[in-house]
Amino acid sequence: EYLLILSSDHGIDANTAAGYLLHGETKGGNEGYLLFYNPQLPAYRHRGLIDVVDIAPTIAKYLKNINIPYNSVGQARNYYGDSSIAIKQKVNTLKQNLVQLKHCAYSQGISTSISEETIESALLFTANQESVKSLENLIGQIKVKLYNL
């Protein structure tokens, strides 16, 4: 088994006197890309930007027996497909990410304003698209606190 990962830092925009703009100063040409390939992964194209902090948890959850790094402040953005098994895998990944981020916030003394009851309830979610959205929302709330977005 293998996972091929191709990425870039960022592009450049040649429309200035110096010949380029600094990282992140423009849209359309100054963004990096990230590509994952494994014959077992379904084809999927995400249009839009992801935060650089989301790369480590995403890669970790594509690798066998690898946990999300303890101090990661990102959201796992894995895509496994649309089947019921794939949705179950996505929900499990997001539950792991939620617990990891909650522990990360706690260890740094950061209050997330999300109660333990809410977290416990989320860990009981069944595998469906509504659960995916709810878990992504909770993860996003914690990520904002950790990353100061």
Image (cartoon, rainbow, N blue to C red):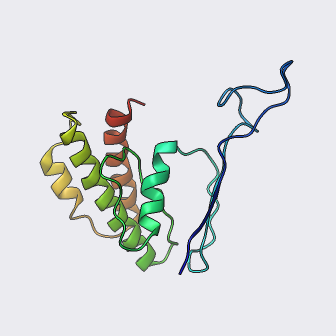
Q: Position of residue 108 (x, y in %)?
A: 22, 36
Is 45 situated left or right of 135 in this image?
Answer: right
Question: At x 18% / y 57%, what residue is drawn?
Answer: 121
| Up/down of 149 relative to 116, above or below | above
**Which quarter of the figure has residue 146?**
top left
Q: Position of residue 31 (x, y in %)?
A: 68, 40
Image quarter hosting the C terminus: top left
Question: At x 34% / y 48%, what residue is drawn?
Answer: 139
Q: Position of residue 144 (x, y in %)?
A: 37, 35
Is 40 situated left or right of 23 in this image?
Answer: left
Depth check, front residue: 103 or 120: 103
Q: Position of residue 93 (x, y in %)?
A: 36, 64
**Which quarter of the figure has residue 115?**
top left
| Up/down of 42 relative to 69, above or below | below
Question: At x 42% / y 55%, what residue is drawn?
Answer: 57
Is 97 situated left or right of 64 in this image?
Answer: left
Is 141 situated left or right of 19 in this image?
Answer: left
Question: At x 62% / y 46%, what residue is drawn?
Answer: 48
| Up/down of 99 relative to 87, above or below | above
**Which quarter of the figure has residue 14?**
top right
